[in-house]
Structures are given as C-alpha cells and as structure tokens.
Image: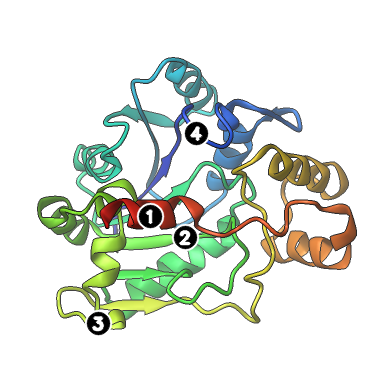
Amino acid sequence: MVKTIVITQARVGSSRFPEKVLQPLGASTLLGVHLQRLRQAKHVSQIVVATTFEEKSGEILEIARQENILAFQGSTNDVLDRFYQAALAHQPDFVVRVTSDCPLIDPQLLDDVIQMVQSHDVDYGSNILIEHFPDGQDIEVFRFDALEKAWKEAKLSSEREHVTPYIIKNSDYRGGVLFRAINYDAPANYNHIRMTVDEPRDLVTIQYLIAKLGQNRPWLDYTNYIFENQDIFSNQDILRNEGYLKSIQNDI
C-alpha cells in the first residue's frame, strides 16, 4: 500500500491573528474542526500536526491529543525543516501539505488530489498551480523524495518559510526540470471566494458558515453559500497569499 501522510502546519504565533487555531469554533476549536475534517479522508495513512516550541504550543499538542492525532514540534521560522523532520520519522511515499487555518478543508477533495498525483506518477500535484479553488481549500501532494531534495537545496527565506516554492519553481509546470508536476483543476474559477482564517473577520465568516450549514458539508456548498450571500461576509476582499508575498519581499 502507498503510504501517504498529511502534515498540517499549526502555530500560536501569527502577526495578524495570534492564537487563531485555538479559537472556539462550533463545539470545538478552529484546529479541532480542521483535524476532524481531515480524519474523514480515505486515502491517508497518518495525520501529523507540525507545530513549534512557542509559548502556548502545548495547547496545540492537547487539541491534537484529544483528536487522536500525532504532533511534532520543530523550527518556528524554518517551516521547511519543521515539515521535513515531521515527515522523516514516518518514511512516507507521499506527503500532503495543508495548513490549520483552513478549518473547512474538504476531505473528498483531499482524496481526489492524492489519487490524481499517484495515478499520474508525478512528483508534485496540487490545486494551487492554477488558483481557481477558494482560498482555504489549498491542497498539495508530493513525493517524500521531492520534499527531501527541497529540504537539502532550498536557500531563499521564502523557500524555507513556505515548504513547497522550491519544488514548484523547479517543476516542469514552471519550466523547470527537477520535478514533474500536475494541477487539479476546479470546475470553475472560485478564486474570489475566501474560507481561510488570517484575520478575526475571517473567523466570523467560518463561525457563520458552520452555524448555518454545519461543519461536514462539501467545499462547494460553503462556496455557493458565500457567493449567494456576499453582502453578509466582510472578509471576501482580503488579499490572498499575503504571507508568501511578504516572504518574497524579504528575499529581495
């Protein structure tokens, strides 16, 4: 059987919304709902929360324990190293990268991206090479060997802080030669829909969605609800990938 592990990044430090993953959400927390949805994926061998040694990280460890999920603590700023070390102990064939500020991540979509990558025998696949899925449904799947090569060779701060830029930039999808890559296409362009949590008003949106629709609906149900009720959501104008754009500025 192909060994596929999901590693989700979670930390208490955040410049825009500190301790966001610890915030109450439904009957749980933001991180708790995220993990509960991940557990529904069928093509996953293991889930690992990759966190840091920052103050209050113990609360992240406790939420993972309550959800019967493994946790790993590593570097705060070298996220690529934290991510690689979290994977290394499990020696997987494939690694899935998600982030815990996406509480409504879709387990079926996760399975679909995993199956696409493995059936096409590529090194990297995601639904973000073309960003047509809503912000908050980002899923990346890659071979452990590709992660290890990135860990050894990536030098720029943006490559160390965000795990996969080295793989993407050196993939055949971007004109590179080191990695074979493929995109999982959205049924339409939903790039303007936001269901991630970077700011307090993002959390208000997620709380409202769960209150109205529950926490177990497919991504498209939440998407359509936001689209049809845009006047009640104040967060839909927030810039996508702001953290990565700041990292690129720091490279310069």
Coordinates of residue 247 in the picture (x, y in percent)? 36, 51
Location of mark 3 (residue): 172
Residue contact between numbered discs 2 and 4, judged by CB atoms under 8 Å? no
Residue 81, placed above or below residue 248: above
Q: Nearer the viewer, mark 3 or mark 4?
A: 4
Q: Nearer the viewer, mark 3 or mark 2?
A: 3
Location of mark 1 (residue): 96
The CA span between labels 1 and 4 is: 22 Å
| Along the viewing direction, whichever of 19 and 3 lies nearer the viewer | 19
Location of mark 2 (residue): 139
> In the picture, which quadrant includes the N terminus?
bottom left
| Along the viewing direction, whichever of 35 and 165 lies nearer the viewer | 165
Ranked by sequence position, the earlier of labels 2 and 4 is 4
Q: Name the quadrant containing residue 31.
A: top right
The secondary structure type at the circle numbered 3 is: helix
Q: Nearer the viewer, mark 2 or mark 4?
A: 4
Q: Nearer the viewer, mark 3 or mark 1?
A: 3
The CA span between labels 3 and 2 is: 19 Å
Task: Indicate which disc residue 14 carries.
Answer: 4
